[in-house]
């Protein structure tokens, strides 16, 4: 069985880094957008089932969790301030309400964030990834 990745000409590579990030955030292969990126909740597949891209070399490490904590913290900070300053709730009540909300939000965004980080690393050729770009469309001359 051939395990080499399909050539870039045979795969619908994303047009730019944002398209690759969207594919990764949707938990799809950032290279082809066809196959699932994860085999378990946070465990990427070793090889894409469609384009045979090797995902075992990804090094997302803890960065997706840091992004999640940063985003959740910034989304909930105004809510917490509003609950304490405007509604006059005690810090304990606010903690009892917001802690479960924060945990659920972080868990919900962890897999899409990891997919986007893997896509970012792949798109920019970081680590063991080979940087690939879609073939440029042939230019047409306007001699009509």
Image (cartoon, grey):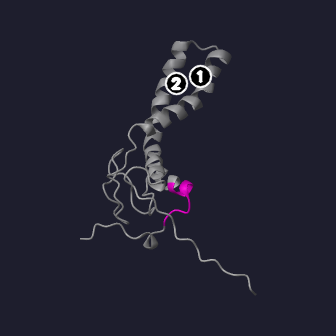
Q: Is 85 covered by the magenta stretch? A: no
Q: Residues within 10 Å of mark 1 (few under 14, many from 20)?
A: some
- Magenta residues? 13-20
Q: Is residue 60 above or below residue 95?
A: below
Q: Please tell me which residue is depicted at 45% across the width and 59% down the height of the picture.
A: 131
Crowd rating for badge 2 (residues with CA inside 10 Å; few <14, some 14–19, many 20+): some
Residue closest to the far left: 1
Which corner quadrant of the image does residue 78 belong to? top right
Dividing the picture into quadrants, the one containing residue 111 is top left
Mark earlier in primary sequence (1, 2): 1
Q: To which residue does mark 2 refer? A: 98
Q: Are marks 1 and 2 in contact (CB under 8 Å)?
A: yes
Report the label total: 2
User: What's the distance in space between the residues labelled 1 and 2, CA to CA?
Assistant: 7 Å
Query: Is residue 138 in view?
Result: yes
Helix, strand or loop under label 2: helix
Q: Would you place residue 66 above or below residue 49 in this image?
A: above
For the point 49% across and 19% down, which residue is it? 96
For mark 1, give the secondary structure.
helix
Q: Which mark is residue 80?
A: 1
Q: Nearer the viewer, residue 136 or 23?
A: 136
Foreground pick, 63 / 34: 63
- Residue at x 51%, y 13% (from the top left corner): 92
- The image quadrant where one finds the C terminus is bottom right
In the image, is 2 to the left or to the right of 120? Answer: left
Q: Relative to 66, say whether 132 is above or below.
A: below
Locate residue 43, reporting x and y percent.
33, 46
Residue 17 lies within the magenta run = yes
**Residue displayed at 65% across by 17% down:** 87
For residue 105, say whether it is visible. Answer: no
């Amino acid at each position: 069985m051939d395990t080499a990745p399909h050539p870039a000409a045979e795969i619908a590579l994303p047009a730019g880094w944002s398209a690759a990030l969207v594919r990764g955030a949707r938990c799809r292969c950032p290279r082809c957008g066809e196959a699932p990126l994860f085999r378990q909740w946070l465990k990427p597949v070793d090889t894409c089932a469609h384009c045979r891209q090797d995902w075992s070399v990804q090094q997302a490490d803890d960065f997706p969790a840091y992004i999640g904590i940063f985003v959740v913290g910034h989304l909930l900070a105004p809510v917490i301030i509003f609950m304490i300053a405007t509604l006059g709730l005690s810090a304990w009540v606010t903690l009892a309400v917001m802690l479960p909300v924060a945990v659920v939000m972080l868990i919900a965004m962890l897999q899409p964030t990891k997919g986007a980080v893997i896509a970012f690393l792949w798109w920019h050729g970081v680590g063991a990834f080979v940087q690939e770009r879609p073939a440029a469309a042939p230019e047409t001359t306007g001699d009509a």
